[in-house]
Amino acid sequence: MNSKWTHQVKKQLKDSVFLGRIATDAEIRSQTPFHAPVWLSERSDKLTFYIKCLSPLPDEITSPLGRIHPYLEGTTNSTQNRRMLNDELGLDRIPYPEVKDKVEEFFEGKLILFTVTLKNDRLYVDLQKVEPGDAADKYFIIPAPDLKAQETREDLEAKLTTERRPITLKKYPNLFDAPTMMIFGERLYQVDLSSKSNSTTYFQAEDTDPDFVDLEPEFHDLVDVIYDHHLFFFSKENYRTMQDKLARGRTHISEKKEEPVLSLMLEREPDEQPEPPTLPVSTEDEFGFLERLKWTAKQQEKMMYRDEDLYAFHMSVKTNPLTILGGMSGTGKSRLARIYGKTLGLKEDENLLFLPISPAYQEPNDLLGYFNPVTNRFHESETGLIRLLQHAEDHPEQLHMVIFDEMNLAQVEHWFSPFLSLLEVKNSNERHLKVFNSEEEVASDAYRPRIKLGDNLIFIGTVNFDETTQAFSDRLLDRTNIISPKKPSFKEAALFYQETKAHHVVSPGETQVSTESFRSEWKVPDAETGLDSLTEFELHTLDELHHLISANDPQKGVSFRVALAISEYLQNVPKDRNGEVVMDRKRLFDLQINQRILTKIKGMDTFVRPLVGEMMNTGIELEYEDGDLSRLFKSPEAQFASSFEESLRTLENKAKELMMYGFTN
């Protein structure tokens, strides 16, 4: 059965908070088909209660129900509700005959903050906060902006006037009417906001100079309920008082005099936990980041990766718009991608998206969404990719990462096609993803017809190579590295876990790496990474590789794109505290040949065998006979470029696959 609520509404509900009180006996009996505001099932210990919502409840939530009464149901089937009632009342320890009365007594004379969950096409209450207070008939919400740790009131006022940058109202999605007032510090602003991207991002109207008024100490007495310093709930009477204050004492932001900034430190309950602060922007060097990456993987996530694999992965992400982690299932590829994002300071559902790929994906619309010409509405795909891309465009200073998990379950070149073309465009100002025709009149401005794909975007894919997956085309392999982390032996893993348990290492702390650091400070300028930065022996090896491969198949070879990518990779080796590179150049050249060129040596015996050589079963043991590529790698000129241990091992494995299956991937 199709849901009554759109995917967008479901997402917005996660950011929505409401205020209410327990329904009265008279209300329930006269206005609903229920019998009591709190009742306990005779067949189980399920407790049900009904909340009257006193703050705005958007039509998008209630209209699908055809609801004829304003009461929302909550039950102890909700883990959140049972946990709160246990914390407050010790619910599970109350004798059954007393439960109903105790819960009614607890709710009596309280204001209740709650969220709404959709289950089986019904709305259910999840309790968030219950505090004493005489309930008024109606409450209004004034939101507070969510600023970064380093941002000040001056930054906020610049967003409202000169800069017109996005303002995040973390718990006020555009399900609600656009707010006309906003609070920050002890200052009340009159605003004209509209939402143009994701549901909690707003922009002040152009050519406006918002008014403000500084609030007296009695402001604290006017606020009825506060939710995590993001939302301020006012009774109807107190809300009008706030409006009157603006009308009587307002000043334009552009006219304000310099004055000390007062911070609003509202009274917290002793056990109330504040929202975790935004991570500070990192000032560490690249090697410091790599040390944190190793610490996070080993000490925090208990995952064992070789330093070489972490370095190679980091270098690929830094220099490529798309990096693929490949290998057998269960070697920690997805975990590595998430660990890397965590070390960058990214947060899931904010600037990191973990997107499992479905075999049903056939085209970009499956990831992005589609435009309905009948309703003039763009319908975002349930993947949430559009929202993240728009957030990335609005916050170019922040890195954003998309992890395509098991990306080759569907044909990558089909669903990822627009990105493949755009991501090779060097100038980020020219990378615009077309979502729908800009000429269309869109009923909702939550989505943009074009989204800029900036340098702050990181795409990572994880892949398995088996009978359930799709092969990669040369077009894709030309544009990415395939990093295959080495699986440690079980003996090594056992020693690793023993060591991590025995030694406690102090956390280096968490920070957020900026786009500037990642793409500029840690990366060598493109002008210094041309073909002239390759050595004579590296160029010779690449030329010979192209000659041998194209002689077998004129449509294959080593393109200028691949050669330039290898050059850029080699020039971007991180350095340690002593100024020494963390990986040897010859080893890196070998890895690049293996990751970027040998991945395209695949197919049937006729093409592949002369290149990779032949594995023969002598009856005693398997013997490997060199092919054209292994002879090249072992030649004196090529050995000056690298020993090619990894590449030679790959060629032997491909020869073994040919012997066993008649083809190689």
Image (spheres, rainbow, N blue to C red):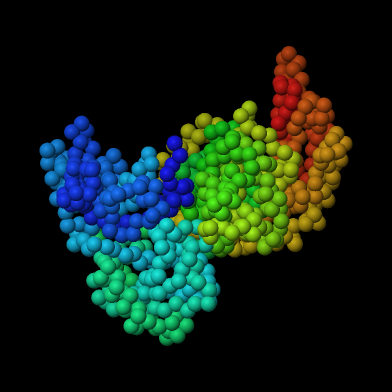
Q: In this view, does 44 lie to the left or right of 289?
A: left
Quadrant, the N terminus: top left
In the rendered view, tell whether residue 243 sits above or below residue 11: below
What residue is rendered at 84% in x and 45% in y? 543
| Observer-nearest of 59 and 646 | 59
Residue 120 in the figure: left or right of residue 574:
left
Residue at coordinates 76% horizontally, 20% vertically from top-left?
Answer: 616
What residue is at 33 percent from the left and 52 percent from the top?
A: 115
Q: Where is residue 632 in the image (x, y as percent from the top left)?
A: 82, 37
Q: Quadrant of the C terminus?
A: top right
304 lies left or right of 474: left
Residue 614 place in picture, x, y as percent: 78, 25
Q: Which residue lies furthest to the top in this view?
A: 619
Q: Quadrant of residue 476?
A: top right
Percent position of residue 432, x then y: 66, 58
Coordinates of residue 222 in the picture (x, y in percent)? 26, 71
370, 297: nearer the viewer: 370
| Quarter of the image where one finds residue 90 | top left
Of the pair 306 and 333, the residue shown nearer to us? 333
Counting the numbered discs, the total is: 0
Please name the residue shown 67% across and 63% down the image.
429
- Residue 337 visible in the displayed image: no
Q: Can I make out residue 105 in this image?
A: yes
